[in-house]
Amino acid sequence: MRRSVGVLYAALETGIELMAETLQCDVEHRTPDVVYVRPQQAKFLHSGPAKIVRTALIEIDAIVAQLAQCATRVEFVALREKLHNDYVNLSYIIANSFSMSGDHSVRQQAVNQAIKNVEQFIQAEGVTAFGAEPVREALFCFDTLRRAYRLVYVIHGKVAAPASAKDKDRALAASFNSTALWSQLHLDCMRVVVARKVGVSQDVLDEILAGSRLAVMAYSYVRQGIALRTEREWLPTNEALDDEDRKLLAESFSDYVESESAADAES
Amino acid sequence: MPNPNPQRGEIYWIDVPRRHTVGSEQYKRRPWLVVSTNAIGYLPIVIGVPLSFEVQKKNRTFRIAILATDIILEPGATLDPGELVALTEQVRVLSTERMEFPRQGRITETALYAVEAGLAYVLDIQ
């Protein structure tokens, strides 16, 4: 195994702290509305916003290329702190350009397509650059981001959160935006490392993977946003079993008792 | 036995003897996290994910770390405070007869949905 999972975990915790420190741009976005796109997805937009998106992505690639060339983790972290605000601001420019269409299905289609393309690229070319396990980790993060964005689309199609939960909803949206962007910044680093065949040191790779992993938190925050909108009440326990349920339960437990007895007899 | 009614997000000690398992299935007494919906609370089963204390298993793809700050232990819990990792690939059905009551604690909503991200990947739930 090329990397130490212990180091990765420690880096994750540090990453969360650093993310909090470096999120100084304080953009007031009230819904989970960032996107993940590549230049090909600009075609979903009219020519004006499409041009803005392409230009912002060129700038984003310039930021990411600088990060990908860092020789040490210390250098990477320092530069990330310096460049992160620019990455966030450019990402919001892209998000706003996609918001102009007003059609959430366009955003969803664009995000799905972009994630799929980059995922396929990393899967095909990444093993040579990083080894199998970091690629597996990156694919998990992409897959989790895809699920998170699918839930964002669900949220946009649902009724608003109850009035009593507005503040919580807003906080969840902000947390989704920041964790999704943090993850995307690091996944972009992986993409650029592979595309430009840049050598990356183990400690920088650990930092990149730890950052990518914030996709899990992005999923968690948007999922909580769904839960706010779908409060459910369950039937009281022990009152919903009909005769068929009882029969099935009795059968499954008789299987269990038989296997227990056989196991006990063997031991 | 009184109806214990375990809830999603709660942690219980459960002993799965080695003789009840095969190959890489998790065994021994360890904390388990209930992940099944409360809607099936009328059945004497839960769906659970085993929790590990082992650092080398931490936070790798679908194995989801639960930070100590996300675990709310009950007063008198015998579970040591500290980080745990949810082995989502080991999700399974457990009879409530296997569970040691009372519960040891529960995890925050944020941690529970993070574990759900691992489960969604393992089960390929879209």
Image (spheres, coloured by chain):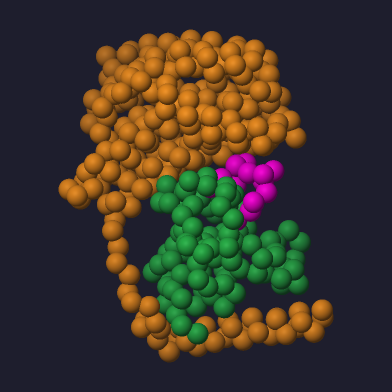
Q: Is residue A4 left or right of residue A252?
A: right
| Residue nearest the observer in this picture, B50 or A93 | B50
Residue lying at 53% horizontally and 52% vertically, measured from the top left: B119
Image coordinates of residue B87 in percent, x first then y, are 61, 53
Q: Residue furthest right?
A: A266
Q: Quadrant of residue A222?
A: top left
Q: Which chain is orange?
A: A
| A248 drawn magenta | no
- Chain B color in figure: green
| B53 drawn magenta | yes
A244 w.r.t. B10: above or below: below
Image coordinates of residue B66 in percent, x first then y, are 53, 47
B38 w.r.t. A173: above or below: below
Image coordinates of residue A57 in percent, x first then y, are 42, 15
Residue lying at 62% horizontally and 86% vertically, measured from the top left: A254
Residue lying at 51% horizontally and 64% vertically, measured from the top left: B76
Does residue A38 show up?
yes
In the image, the segment drawn in magenta is: B51-66
Image coordinates of residue A145 in percent, x first then y, are 46, 37
